[in-house]
């Protein structure tokens, strides 16, 4: 497995000039060699977090298919020219299936895919497809709603915090679903947001959490790539919702629960499809029902009754009885007072994917 970008580029530089220009690598006879699958990660593989969950998915794929597949990963790959260079090198080195794990790789994937039509690309969180490029993502907001229920029950101040990277629809879905979940059990609850304009900067993530705690927040959630927010909650004796992974190692007392991402089954299914010739370009958006999102890792500060409540609501969600973005008897308004979901109605997928507003109860404005 490649450990970092420098090693990947150094190894790939041994490939012939012809290959680096996009000509296909020699193929092996069917069944004589394992499927070569590569993974490209934005950050290092830490003990927990976004990239950890994708690497756990890679490991699950390797374990499930054994000698039929050979996997490798390149971590710490910046979006932009470096990503395109690494993708081109991986394709030239004979990888038949390449998974990328950041929406910021999308344009690089599309350019390289055009030059390597025989290679299948899986653009996780990507937003463009081609004959050899599939996209996938998870309904993270479903886990966010469930975690909001836990936060609403556990918070003594009724004020939660959220540390996030960028105001993209996925992040806004998470903030809004969390707030709706929290206000479903505490209608007066509010949520403060800190925008960092980066996915990975542990010192700034920690500082943001500390600022929220200083402002009266007693439970915090986040969508950034490290465990710094959880560590800050542990240090300050506050509560936190883990995201991506179970983070009880970093916050044994602080963690209320974890919203975890499960990629192993999806990665395995897609690799099997390449092996049996059934792979096709498609878009996948899975959630609790599909097993891609799970609430687990309950901590000691969450009462048993609340744990049971959250797990029951997770079952309701899996069976289609609970929809985070469905209004009840009253409409759902944004924090400017505009009706966003009329009473009794729910958002469709297109509306969720284009979300560009903050729900009532969120004490923040969208960055310009």
Image (cartoon, rainbow, N blue to C red):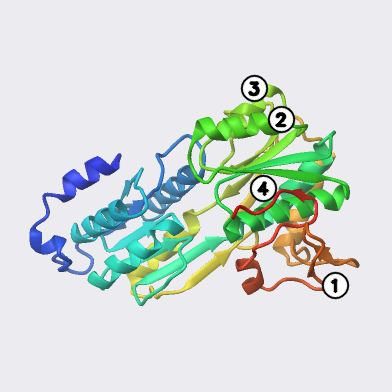
Relative side of 326 to 295, left or right: right
> Image quadrant of residue 128?
bottom left
Label located before the other in sequence (4 or 3): 3
Question: Mark 4 or 3, which is nearer the eye?
Answer: 3
Label located before the other in sequence (3 or 2): 2
Q: Is residue 227 above or below residue 368?
A: above
Residue picked out by circle 3:
235
Q: In this view, does 323 lie above or below 53?
A: below
Residue nearer the viewer, 162 or 311: 162
Give SS at disc 4. Answer: strand
C-beta proximity under 8 Å, tags 3 and 2: no
How packed mark 1 is, by other alpha carbons closer than 10 Å (few <14, some 14-19, many 20 or more), is few
Q: Distance between the residues labelled 3 and 2?
A: 11 Å
Residue picked out by circle 1:
344
Q: Where is residue 68 in the image (x, y as percent from the top left)?
A: 30, 58
Relative side of 200 to 304, left or right: left
Label located before the other in sequence (3 or 1): 3
C-beta proximity under 8 Å, tags 4 and 3: no
Give SS at disc 3. Answer: helix
Q: How far apart are marks 2 and 1 (CA)?
A: 36 Å
Residue picked out by circle 2:
213
Q: Quadrant of the N terminus?
A: top left
Give SS at disc 2. Answer: helix
Question: Mark 1 or 4, which is nearer the eye?
Answer: 1
Q: On residue 295, which mark appears?
A: 4
Residue 255 shows up from this direction: no
C-beta proximity under 8 Å, tags 1 and 4: no
Residue at 37%, 64% in the rendered image: 107
Q: Position of residue 348 (x, y in %)?
A: 68, 73
Question: Mark 2 or 4, which is nearer the eye?
Answer: 2
Question: Mark 3 or 2, which is nearer the eye?
Answer: 2
Residue 83 shows up from this direction: yes
């Amino acid at each position: 497995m490649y450990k970092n970008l420098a090693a990947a580029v150094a190894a790939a530089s041994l490939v012939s000039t012809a290959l680096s220009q996009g000509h296909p690598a020699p193929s092996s006879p069917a069944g004589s060699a394992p499927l070569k699958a590569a993974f490209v990660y934005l950050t290092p593989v830490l003990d927990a977090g976004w990239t950890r969950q994708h690497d756990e998915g890679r490991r699950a794929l390797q374990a499930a298919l054994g000698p039929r597949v050979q996997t490798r990963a390149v971590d710490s790959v910046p979006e932009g020219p470096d990503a395109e260079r690494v993708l081109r090198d991986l394709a030239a080195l004979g990888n038949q299936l390449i998974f990328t794990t950041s929406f910021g790789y999308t344009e690089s994937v599309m350019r390289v895919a055009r030059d390597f039509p025989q290679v299948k690309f899986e653009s996780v969180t990507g937003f463009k497809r081609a004959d050899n490029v599939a996209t996938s993502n998870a309904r993270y907001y479903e886990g966010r709603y469930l975690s909001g229920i836990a936060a609403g029950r556990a918070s003594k101040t009724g004020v939660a915090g959220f540390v996030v990277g960028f105001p993209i629809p996925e992040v806004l879905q998470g903030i809004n679903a969390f707030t709706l979940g929290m206000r479903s059990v505490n209608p007066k609850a509010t949520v403060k947001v800190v925008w960092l304009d980066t996915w990975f900067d542990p010192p700034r993530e920690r500082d943001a959490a500390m600022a929220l705690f200083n402002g009266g927040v007693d439970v915090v959630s986040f969508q950034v790539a490290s465990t710094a927010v959880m560590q800050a909650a542990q240090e300050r004796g506050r509560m936190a919702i883990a995201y991506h992974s179970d983070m009880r190692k970093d916050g044994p007392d602080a963690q209320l629960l974890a919203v975890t991402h499960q990629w192993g089954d999806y990665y395995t299914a897609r690799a099997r499809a390449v092996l049996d010739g059934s792979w096709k370009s498609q878009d996948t958006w899975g959630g609790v029902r599909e097993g891609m999102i799970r609430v687990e890792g309950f901590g000691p500060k969450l009462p048993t009754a609340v744990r049971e409540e959250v797990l029951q609501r997770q079952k309701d969600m899996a069976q289609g009885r609970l929809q985070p973005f469905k209004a009840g008897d009253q409409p759902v308004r944004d924090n400017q007072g505009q009706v966003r979901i009329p009473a009794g109605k729910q958002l469709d997928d297109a509306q969720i994917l284009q979300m560009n507003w903050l729900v009532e109860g969120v004490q923040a404005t969208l960055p310009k």
